[in-house]
Image (tube, rainbow, N blue to C red):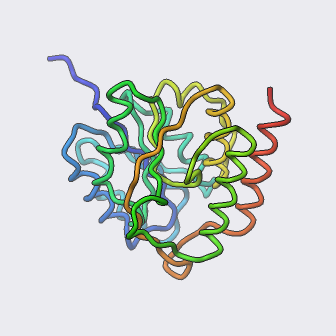
Amino acid sequence: MKHLAPSVSIIIPVYNERRTIREIIKKVQAVPFDKEIIIVDDGSTDGTRDLLKLVESEEGIRVIYHPNNMGKGMAIRTAASYVASEILVIQDADLEYDPNDYEELIAPIQEGISNIVYGTREVLPGNTYSHLTFFLGGKFLTWLTNILYGSHLTDMPTCYKAFHTETFQSLDLSCQRFEFCPEVTAKLLKMGETILEVPINYYPRKIKDGKKIRFTDGLQAIYTLLRIRFFET
């Protein structure tokens, strides 16, 4: 019997998420459609790897281990080379995003409406933010993206990004850390792709709970947007 490829690949980059990794895997597994889960442990040292060893043999799960911490962008790039489906979705290993939003996220790609869909946190009235600095930083980066690339996005730095796999794999990405979001967005827009947004739920966590993005990552994001706009052909 011919083995059918899963309809969606869920990429989960992981770094020191011992408290949440088992729960997010269960939530992703519970979403009712055919999928593969590709987890890249990015050099965790807090016991996350021990938990992943317990699930790596489960059907539909592939776990890849980076020998050391290389960054979220690098983890996503590693995972993308293993994707076996036509659609891929990025999922953080914490519990800020709800996998029940997947179907809304991937529907426009399945229907041929768009090759890229972002889940915007800026629409649903119940959504809050973890820290005012992160909120304002995200707003600024989205505004800068729109100014530089003529787009109309409301939430460029969102984790929930879904892609037609062929479109994603056509990008020549060099990102290592959190500059993944501005790099992939800038390169797609510069290619002339249209990014569709759909509303998603958001349950933010604080820095004390393990949030890892820092002020320097914001500076790197600005640099990335400017570099691709003005210095890449």
Q: Is residue 64 above or below residue 138?
A: above
Task: Kindly identify the residue that appears in the image at 58 percent across and 28 percent down.
Answer: 193
Q: The N terminus appears in which quarter of the rendering?
A: top left
Residue 88, x across and y down, in percent = 41, 37
The image quarter containing residue 54 is bottom left
Say if 196 sits above or below 181 in the image.
above
The image position of residue 31, as x and y in percent, is 23, 49
Seen in the image, is 121 located left or right of residue 33?
right
Q: Nearer the viewer, residue 117 or 213?
A: 117
Residue 128 in percent (x, y) is at 46, 72
User: Which residue sits at x=42%, y=33%?
Assistant: 83
Image coordinates for residue 210, horizontal then vertical, percent: 52, 74
In this view, the residue farthest toward the top is 2
Front one among 53 and 162: 162
Q: Which of 69 and 225 is in front in this view?
A: 225
Extreme-left residue of the structure: 1
If the image is split into quadrants, where does the C terminus sit? top right
| Left/right of residue 19 with respect to residue 34 in the rendered view | right
